[in-house]
Image: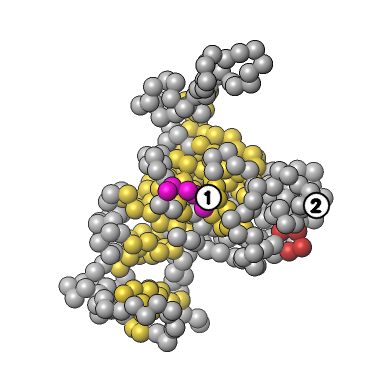
Amino acid sequence: MPRFWLAFVGLSLAATSFAEDLDYHVTDPDLKVVRLDSSPDASFLSVRTDTTGRIFVGGRKTLYVYDIDEAGGYKPRHLLCEFPDHTWVNDIEVRGDDLYIVTVSAVYQLPGARVKREGVQPERLLWGVPNGHVHQCFHACAWGPEGDLYVSMGDPLWYYGDFSRPDHWGHWTMFFKPDSVVRGSPDPAQPPTEGLPKKVGGEKKEGDLRSEPRRGQETRAERVRVGNTDWATMPYNGVGAVFRIRPDGTNLRSFSRGLRNPCGLCFDKNWNLFTNDNDHEGLPSLYAPGRLLHVTEGSYFSWPRGWLQSKTPDRADILPAVNDEMGRAVPVLQT
């Protein structure tokens, strides 16, 4: 039976009392690779550290923590939370003492789990995508500049490829935490005109296409009761996407669409958002290589009707990729 390894790259001068050197070559002379743990049955998939050096690791159905010991190394792994098999903890984020995890089919908040070691109770914030293939559906998360959690989702219709269907877009209902916020509106703490189109360069004249604010057209998210819990709902039709949601699970919004399988999600120091989109192995002549993309609000990346400008130079609507020479790619995460 294969053993799954958790390897960690760190400063070579750091203490590694619970670690084993590995015969890997690292180009930076100040770094080395050590093995912190291995397991015959736990699939180590996602990794996140907090500011104190604790390591949180997600797997097929488990969330572990590696606490720092008195010598500055790491203690043996400690189980924080266990889910049903094949839940797949794809990504982890930290906010204060809370952890946020993204599984194949849901986003959870784990209150106090950064420091709690017993009695951790996950609270579901977002769900609704079909519980599909482990390498599709919800993937990654990252905190945005306004404090929202950004979440990427792959195209659940992974069996696409024979072109016999008239419409590839799926139609899902996304469930999230209800509140009094109207969908499509800005933060309720902001003035009513915040975020609305503004006049530039004087009064609007005849023929000016700049839009005026339209009042009374926002609609509240419909609420439904599932079991003993009330949920707000948002209809979504399309393919892979990036969503944003508040830390308490309210005010879900679609941020970017037209993605196939955006496996990683991260911001740079200037709050530019990036993702890497997994290519379509079944039709490499049309949908390979993988795409490194700069994701902006309202962007549409054309899957499955297009992929790269180099593939269809006659298509002026295909957004450019940051890098379109990545080769065949089945990425996991990015940072």
Which residue has dot 2 on it? 163
Q: Measure the alpha-carbon separation of dots 2 and 1.
A: 25 Å
Q: Which residue does the image show at 37% across and 42% down from the upper left?
A: 147
Q: In the depicted view, which residue is nearer to us: 328 or 168? A: 328
Q: Which residue does the image show at 45% across and 34% down from the upper left?
A: 251
- Badge 2 marks a residue whose secondary structure is loop
Secondary structure, magenta segment, majority class: loop
Q: In the depicted view, which residue is nearer to us: 56 or 277? A: 277
User: In the figure, residue 167 lies in which quadrant?
Assistant: top right
CB contact under 8 Å: marks 2 and 1: no
Please say if 88 is above or below 245. below
Spot occupied by residue 27 in the image (x, y as percentages of width and height): 43, 79
Q: Which residue does the image show at 27% across and 73% down from the upper left?
A: 74
Please say if 209 is above or below 165. above
Q: Which residues are magenta?
A: 270-274
- Residue type at mark 1: give it: Ser
- Residue type at mark 2: give it: Phe
Which residue has dot 1 on it? 152
Q: Which residue does the image show at 38% across and 26% down from the upper left?
A: 190
Spot occupied by residue 145 in the image (x, y as percentages of width and height): 40, 43
- Badge 1 marks a residue whose secondary structure is strand
User: Is residue 188 something one can see in this rendering?
Assistant: yes
Spot occupied by residue 219 in the image (x, y as percentages of width and height): 53, 23
Q: Residue furthest left?
A: 70
Query: Position of 137 compared to 96: left or right?
Result: right
